[in-house]
Every structure is written in structure tokens, then in C-alpha cells.
Image: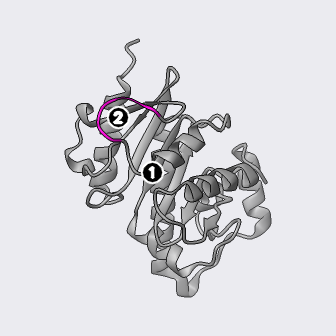
């Protein structure tokens, strides 16, 4: 079976995110790890025009091996992919409804309202306070939040979301699921009826997730 080039995987994922409106302009970044190297999208290039030649490759120490300057968020990707938690891919997106939710919500350990099965299964999802994009402080905070809560996603206040996966598809799917669920939250928030805690617990148990 032919294995797809990691660079092509990232380009395909990037195009999909852009077409879904989750990475406007030159925002957002993707990464995956393979053969002891990290493949990551570059800084300052829109996902709508990304090519395999634009993908940067860095080692596990953050040193550039080849390609252009990596995303300004490379520290965050590096921290997560080095964590030893089975994380093989990271998706950072700027979905409109997710960013809007991050502005309205208060930082906490599990802020996503379980109003759909997708949102219930996505949790727990912490919301971090405002932190400087691309900073070591942000990278450390995301790493700690994932370690402490066993989260698969972390929302960054006034910024966006970081989703994790055993592969790129899983990370991107989670970003889409949360954005879709929070779109529903905005459309129906005056009459919301979240799933009760016991139902959320059973959903997570059924699908092998934490209770």
C-alpha cells in the first residue's frame, strides 16, 4: 500500500480547512509527525494557495531541516507532538463561531456546552485566558492544559482552537465538529437544553472516552 507524502497530506488538509472557512487569510496552522520529523505549515502563506514545496520540516528540537520559515505557532505544535501522549497531528483553526464563543465564555477546564453528541464527545475542552500568539507562554499553557485534563482540544481566548489527533484526519474532524456545534449554540442559545451529566458520561463511556 502506497503511503501518502506527509507534505501532500498537509496541503490536502489545509485546502479543506480553508474551503470550510476555518482558516481565513493566512491564519491557522497544521502539523504532523512522521519518522522523527515534524512537518508543519509555513508562516504567512494562505491555505488557499499552499503547495507541498511550502511545507517546512523541523526536528524534535525545533531546528529547521528544510523548507520555509515554519508557522509562528511552531512552539505549540512542538510541545504537543513531543508530549508522548499519542498525539501525531495538530490542527489550529480560527473558525468564526469558535472564536466568538471564546470571547463570550470564561476560561475554565471544560467550557463546551454538551448540546449535541459531537460536543459531548469532544469534551472536556478547556478555555485558556488571553495569551500572546506564537509565544512560549502559550505553548506551555496548551501543553499543561492537555496534560491535566486529557483534552483532545483546547480553545484559546479571542484566538481560536487547537485540536489533536492520532492522525491529521482526526484532528481536523474535531475542529469541524466543535465549530459546527458552536454554530448551533449561537443559533439556539436562547432555548438551549444541554444533555444531562449522566447522558454525557454514558456517551463518553460508550465511545471509550473519559467520563
Q: CA distance from mark 2 to mark 1?
A: 13 Å
Residue 122 visible in the shown view: no
For label 1, the SS is loop
Q: Residue at image x 51%, y 57%?
A: 135
Q: How is the image coloured?
A: one colour
Of residues 159 and 192, the one nearer the viewer is 159
Of residues 101 and 28, the one nearer the viewer is 28
Cβ–Cβ below 8 Å for labels 2 and 1? no
Judged left or right of residue 105, residue 57 is left
Residue 103 painted magenta: no
Q: Dot 2, crowdedness within 10 Å: few (<14), some or many (≥20)? A: many
Residue 51, how many percent across, how many down? 22, 36
In the image, which disc is placed on residue 47? none
For label 2, the SS is strand
Residue under numbered circle 1: 73
Residue 88, how many percent across, how many down? 55, 34
The numbered mark, 2 or 1, whose residue comes first in the sequence reads 2
Residue under numbered circle 2: 56
Residue 127, how many percent across, how many down? 61, 67
Judged left or right of residue 34, residue 125 is right
Residue 44, how many percent across, how many down? 27, 52
Q: Which residues are magenta?
A: 63-69
Residue 68 painted magenta: yes
User: Which residue reaches farthest top?
Assistant: 1
Of residues 201 and 84, the one nearer the viewer is 84
Judged left or right of residue 121, residue 130 is left
Amino acid at each position: 500500500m502506497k503511503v501518502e507524502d506527509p507534505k501532500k497530506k498537509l496541503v490536502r488538509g489545509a485546502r479543506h480547512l480553508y474551503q470550510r472557512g476555518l482558516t481565513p487569510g493566512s491564519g491557522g496552522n497544521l502539523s504532523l509527525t512522521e519518522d522523527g520529523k515534524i512537518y508543519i505549515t509555513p508562516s504567512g502563506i494562505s491555505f488557499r494557495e499552499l503547495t507541498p514545496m511550502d511545507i517546512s520540516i523541523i526536528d524534535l528540537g525545533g531546528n529547521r531541516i528544510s523548507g520555509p520559515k515554519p508557522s509562528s505557532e511552531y512552539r505549540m505544535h512542538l510541545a504537543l507532538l513531543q508530549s508522548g501522549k499519542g498525539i501525531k497531528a495538530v490542527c489550529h483553526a480560527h473558525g468564526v463561531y469558535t472564536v466568538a464563543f471564546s470571547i463570550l465564555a470564561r476560561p475554565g477546564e471544560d467550557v463546551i456546552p454538551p448540546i449535541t453528541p459531537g460536543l459531548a464527545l469532544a469534551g472536556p475542552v478547556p478555555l485558556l485566558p488571553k495569551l500572546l500568539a506564537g509565544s512560549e507562554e502559550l505553548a506551555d499553557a496548551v501543553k499543561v492544559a492537555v496534560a491535566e485534563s486529557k483534552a483532545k482540544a483546547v480553545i484559546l481566548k479571542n484566538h481560536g482552537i487547537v485540536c489533536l489527533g492520532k492522525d491529521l484526519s482526526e484532528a481536523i474532524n474535531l475542529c469541524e465538529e466543535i465549530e459546527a456545534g458552536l454554530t448551533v449554540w449561537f443559533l439556539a442559545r436562547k432555548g438551549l437544553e444541554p444533555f444531562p451529566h449522566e447522558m454525557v458520561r454514558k456517551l463518553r463511556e460508550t465511545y471509550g472516552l473519559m467520563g
